[in-house]
Amino acid sequence: MAYLDHAATTPMLPRVLDVYVRTARELGNASSLHASGRAARRTVEEARERIGEALGAKPSEVVFTGSGTEADNLAVKGLHWARRDEGRGRVVSTAIEHHAVADAVAWLGDHEGADVTELPVDKLGRVRVDALAELLDERADEITVITCMWANNEVGTLQPIDEIVALATPLGIPVHTDAVQAVGHTPVCFTACQADALALSGHKLGGPTGTGALLLRRDTKCTPLLHGGGQEREIRSGTLDVPGIAALAEAVAHAVRTQETEAQRLAVLRDELVAGIREAVPETIYNGDPEQRLPGNAHFSFPGCEGDALLMLLDAAGVECATGSACSAGIAQPSHVLLAMGAGEDDARSSLRFTLGWPTTKAEVDALVAAIPEAVERARSAGLS
């Protein structure tokens, strides 16, 4: 089986699994005061230091969560609630966010009456900074938070986070970035980007599922989602998952340390994949920015095909991929990302995402290229029948 859906989840690295198993054998609640508790706390704090060092953050800025989704919700809702008390009520997002952000923003609008503004994107899936500048000129005093992903989870386009932060910071508006797809795959430095909050997830970079973190500046006010034991600066209560946190730190440290060489390797494989598909299916549409994109992402529209049908045909041929975000799997609707980029509904329904990861081999890419012509032909025939 050729697995080309690493943006949904990627296998745990062997070294990460070793850390997880070793730590899971140890006893101790990191909030307890006895020796076992202190040992667990030491493991947590060492992990916090490793993640901070890898991502250019102070250890005290690392807040552990149970997932990237939780980190996004904590940032979007928490920053909005903290600033809403100052008389503001507008949340600024983009038209291409992952549902972890998009649905959190929509919830604030539907249930709490927040005003929501979605920034448009260009045809390559890049957020239009000029639209943000215009909005800030008109409504800066209304805005509680700006949230923009670092890299798009569907088409892989990298976003102009530095430019967004440069516009927002002089106005005192906090910026959150969902960097779940970016960390470990493209250079990410929390200090350098100067965002106020940044979300990451373990299972996207060789760590365990159910682990994540929010990098949050010490002077940024954030109202907690959870209340209880007051862990994590009283921003995220809950007994800490010590084995998961230790494994997350190992995954982040390894992914960042090997990021440059691994990105070069994946980009070569991705380019071979793109060339192979374009040769096999010349009329295919390659989506996203051809240069400023994640190294392991290749996203196509296949005119005349239904994405779901094509996915299942490839699956039967031994190739696993995705029609878009894994969170949308099984829902028969066009990609909101492609629609925002100006694609028609038919093209937005005909898309597939192929994403590469640390275990990906040339043989898997070759398997896809070999399988795609027949799968496309059968998908088109099924659509016409």
Image (cartoon, rainbow, N blue to C red):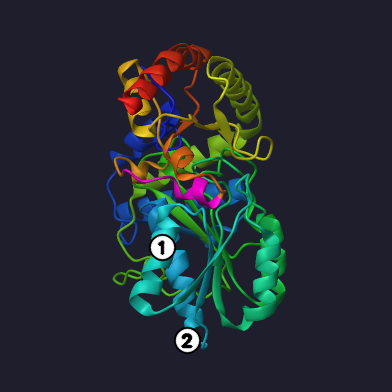
Question: Magenta stretch: residue 339 in it?
Answer: yes
Q: How many marks?
A: 2
Q: Is residue 2 magenta?
A: no
Classify 10 Å Cα crowding around label 1: few (below 14), some (14-19), many (20 and above): many
Q: Residue at x 52, y 84 (%)?
A: 88
Give coordinates of residue 337: x percent, y percent.
Answer: 50, 48
Q: What is the number of the mark on residue 111?
A: none
Q: Mark 1 vs mark 2: which is more N-terminal? A: 1
Residue farthest to the front, as pictured: 385
Query: Is 235 on the left or on the right of 341, as rendered?
Result: left
Q: How far across and how far down the image is residue 58, in percent?
A: 59, 59
Taking the spot 41% from the left edge, 54% from the top edge, the residue there is 99
**Residue interval drawn in magenta:** 332-340
- Residue found at x 44% / y 29%: 304
Instruction: Rate crowding at label 2 as few (under 14), some (14 to 19) or many (20 or more) other CA atoms within 10 Å.
Output: few
Give me the disc on residue 73. 1
Q: Which residue is mark 2?
A: 85
